[in-house]
Image: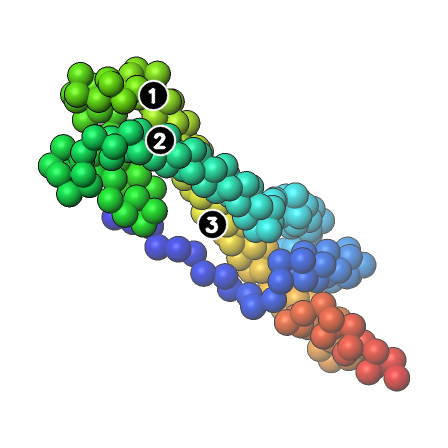
Amino acid sequence: MKKQPTNRKYNFPDADLYLQSIERIQYARRDITAFESYSYGIEKIKAFYNLCEKFKNLPDDDELLGDQMITTEKKDKAAENLKSAIRSLMTRVAIKYNNRTGRYRKFGTAKMGDMSDAQLLFCGRRVVRVARAQIDFLADLGVNENIIGRIVEAAKQFEQALNIQQDKIADRDIAVERRVELGNKIYDELVLICNIGKDIWAEKDPVKYEAYTIYESNNEQKKARKNKEG
């Protein structure tokens, strides 16, 4: 059974989650004596901080997407090389066989430009197989193992590039899942530390109470502080 994707519990950027968490950690350290009465001591604060640092060092989606795009560009180039090798052979085949004949159609290269990656890979293998079976009929057109071998090598390179691209897509999916899971864990801890902080200062200091409020973005937090200072 396929695992269901994990949903983010927070609706602001990861950078804001990190910054808000680090800021609340500083407040909790300042208020450590009060926090200890809630069984939230320095060791838990350190553990929370370590989670934040681990989160900060994870590659973000732009970085992962960039890696994926690079492999896609290489795959696309390999696909064009394979198509070029196939067209070179089919130009020779077309000289001898009309494209409506069975011998031509056996190659299965019609609408090659519209083929999916998987279809193109299978097409390359089929062209090699059919060309070798008809090599005696096509020898006078210069079709030989060198011509066929170019397709074999291009198909091999394309398959390798396709596999690398698929691996990068999978790596990105896994990394995104890990980032969401860790982000949610940090958010849960942020909520906990803020709830404790607000409970500590609820009847004592409204400014410190407000400092433990979670804002949807760091920019909103800055605006709120500016309004208070004004």
State the image coordinates of residue 123 (x, y, percent, origin top left): 26, 35
Which amino acid type corresponds to the residue marked 2 in the rendered image?
A: Ser
Which circle's residue, 1 or 3, is located before the other in the chain? 1
User: Vertically, is 79 above or below 219?
Assistant: above
Q: Check residue 177 in the rendering and tell me which mark sits there, or answer none.
A: 3
User: Vertically, is 157 above or below 70?
Assistant: above
Which amino acid type corresponds to the residue marked 1 in the rendered image?
A: Ile
Q: Left or right: 187 with respect to 163? A: right
* Mark 2 Cα shell of 10 Å, populated few (<14), some (14-19), many (≥20): some
Q: According to the image, label 1 marks what residue? A: 147
Q: Check residue 88 in the rendering and tell me which mark sits there, or answer none.
A: 2
Q: Residue at x 11, y 37 (%)?
A: 102
Calculate the distance from the C-alpha at mark 1 to the C-alpha at mark 3. Answer: 46 Å
Calculate the distance from the C-alpha at mark 1 to the C-alpha at mark 2. Answer: 8 Å
Which amino acid type corresponds to the residue marked 3 in the rendered image?
A: Glu
SS for callout 1: helix
